[in-house]
Image: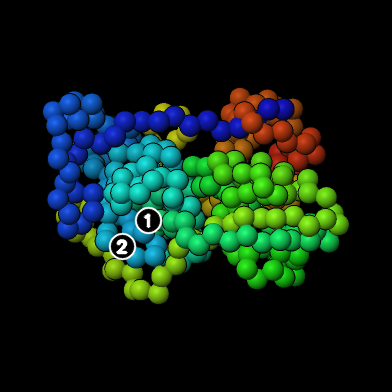
Amino acid sequence: MPLGLRRKKKGKSKETSTLVDGEAPPARGRGDDEAEAGAGAGVRAGAVGAAASRGPVRLVFHTQLAHGSPTGRVEGFGSVKELYAKIAEAFRIAPAEIMFCTLNTHKIDMNKLLGVQIGLEDFIFAHVKGIKKEVEVFKSEDSLGLTITDNGNGCAFIKRIKAGSLIDQIKVICVGDHIESINGKNVAGYRHYEVAKNLKELKKGQTFTLKLIEPMKSFEIIEPRSKSGNFAEEKICRGRETLRLRAKGSATVEEMLSDVEEKATKKVDDLLEMYMGIRDLELAATMVEAGKGKNNPDEFAVALDEALGDFAFPDEFVFDVWGAIGDNLKE
């Protein structure tokens, strides 16, 4: 059963406001304005639909580099890849340098990872690549004790290390580390399930080499959150509403998941870790959406095929996910 996610790029914003607070906007030619006309419309159109009674809303999110930087502003994105490109543009770095983002904390907190939903008042901290390290590991057990996730933009990293596991005993390997290569095989750009598969296929009783990159860290004080300009004046936060990024189509402003849907999504995420060694709330939420109203595992499998494309889930996993979705949504 082939499953997988697809993403689509959108245009850039034509706004001429500064990307980083305190900086002058870059010079633009007439061609730039024409080429970028109408960009960001996906996000703004979704906002208009959600708040038609109040007129158009300009969604601007504030961001910093987690190790310390001025405050930047990003807008006009409809997918995770586009968001990373906007953040990279604001700080004049390559998008590939961004490992992952956390919301409302500069700390490496895996419970605060940015997914496909951003609260309308969330502050985005971008963690960028820091020190490289190479580690030799003797695989004395079948399970390494790693849970892998990725940022949706080609960077797979360690989300969890099981206490007492083989990897837990190697203190140089840390949560948040990007896995760059396995036994000399470059896996940069791989999805998390591909990296997890490569790790699982390593033979027990042999030594393998990991090349890792840890997030850049700083002991400097992060600049205080800024709420200047239009962001504060427009008061775009409306309770539980979030900006939902889309693999296809425009981003939209919508209500957060209900408690029941959130519980089902977390259960499916647990099953992803159990069966595949990965964590992916975006994938879990997509599976929950596909499982609504499905009367049996076969209907659910067909719905997954329509929604996804690169995954090859075992039958027992599909059955357990279908059961978990049904059990949790009925409660």
Label 2 amino acid? Answer: Ser
Tell me if I can see residue 180 in this picture.
Answer: yes
Q: Which residue is drawn at 17% across and 30% down?
A: 33
Residue 120: image location, x then y, percent? 34, 51
Q: How crowded is mark 1: few (under 14 residues within 10 Å), some or many (20 or more)?
A: many
Could you say which disc has been placed on residue 69 in the image? 2
Report whether 130 appears left or right of 204: left
Report whether 120 appears left or right of 180: left
Query: Which residue is more in the foreground, 248 or 262?
Result: 248
Residue 278: image location, x then y, percent? 65, 49
Report whether 53 appears left or right of 262: left
Quadrant placement of the N terminus: top right
Residue 294: image location, x then y, percent? 67, 31
Q: Residues within 10 Å of mark 2 (few under 14, many from 20)?
A: some
Number of numbered discs overlaid on the protein picture: 2
Closer to the chain start, of discs 2 and 1, is 2
Q: Quickly name the residue at label 1.
A: 124
Asked if the residue at tag 1 contacts the one at tag 2, i.e. Cβ–Cβ closer than 8 Å, the answer is no
Q: Is mark 1 on a helix, strand or loop?
A: strand
Q: Residue at x 78, y 57 (%)?
A: 207
Say if 145 sits above or below 247 in the image: below
Q: Which residue is drawn at 32% across and 55% down?
A: 63
Query: Which residue is more in the foreground, 147 or 295?
Result: 147
Could you say which disc has been placed on residue 294 in the image? none
Gap between marks 2 and 1 measured at Cα: 12 Å
Q: Is mark 2 on a helix, strand or loop?
A: loop
From the viewer's perspective, is the residue at label 2 or at label 1 nearer? 2
